[in-house]
Image: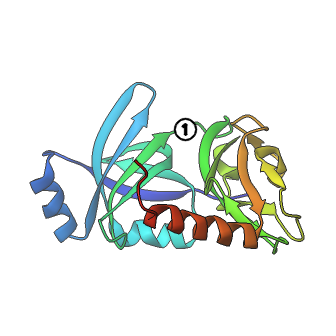
Amino acid sequence: MAQSEVLKAQKRAKLGSHSARSLRAEGRVPANLQGDGAHIDFSIDLREFLATRRHHTHLYDIDIDGEVKTAVVRELQWDTFGDNIVHVEFKSVTRGVETEAEVAIEWVGQPKGVLNHLVEHVTIRCIPSLIPDFVEVKVEGLDEGTHLKAKDIQLPAGLSLAIPGNSDIATIISAHGHEREGEEGEGEEGAEPTA
C-alpha cells in the first residue's frame, strides 16, 4: 500500500503570471487545492515535489502554513516543450474514502496487427492509497479486428472502473490495410478535381 508524503507549502499572497514567474525563478512551482468547496492557492518546492514523484507517491499531506490537507494530484501542467512543470492542481481527498483518479494505460505484449489505441489514460475509482502508476491491458497475440474495451483492463484488487466497461479503448488493425488506406488518401489528395 502506497504511503503519503508531506509537502511543505506556502500560501500565495499574489496571483498572476508575474508572481508565478518569480516563484519558478526561486525553484518553487505554483499550485492549488480544490475540493470540499474550497480553493487554496499556494506554492511548493519543485525539487521536493519531483522527488516524491520519483518515489511513485500519489497521496500527499500538504502542510499549507501549518494547516494540513490530504490530497492527490489532479493535473500537472507543463511548459510548451513538455520539459518543466509550471503548475500543479491537487484534489482534496479523505483517507479510506474512494475517489476517482486518472491513470496511464500500459499496453503489454505484441498483437498480430497494429495497435491503434484510442486513449492513453483511464479513470478509475479506489481509495487514495491504492492509486497505481498505471494499469495494464494485455494485447499479446490479439488478432486483427479485435476491439478492446475498458473492461479488458487488468485492474488490481481494490480498483474499479469509473467509466462504462464497454467504452472503446483500442483496436487491432491490419498493417497492410493501414498502409493501403494511407496510399489511397495520398492519391485522392493529389487527384484532379472533377467538374
Mark count? 1
Q: At label 1, which amino acid type do we have?
A: Val
Instruction: Locate residue 103, reporting x and y percent.
Output: 62, 54
Residue at image x 12%, y 46%?
14
Instruction: Locate residue 115, reporting x and y percent.
Output: 72, 66
Residue at image x 60%, y 45%?
101
Q: For the residue labelled by badge 1, is the local secondary structure a helix, a strand or a loop?
A: loop
Residue most extreme to the front: 195
Residue where numbered disc 1 is placed = 93
Q: Is residue 39 visible?
A: yes
Using the image as rendered, state which of residue 187 and residue 35 is in the foreground: 187
Q: How is the image coloured?
A: rainbow
Instruction: Locate residue 168, reporting x and y percent.
Output: 72, 45
Instruction: Locate residue 111, reporting x and y percent.
Output: 83, 70
Q: Is residue 56 visible?
A: no
Residue most extreme to the left: 18
91 vs 158, left or right, is left
Residue at image x 66%, y 52%?
131
Using the image as rendered, state which of residue 175 and residue 126 is in the foreground: 175
- Specify the quadrant of the image occupied by residue 123: top right
Q: Is residue 130 above or below residue 136?
A: above
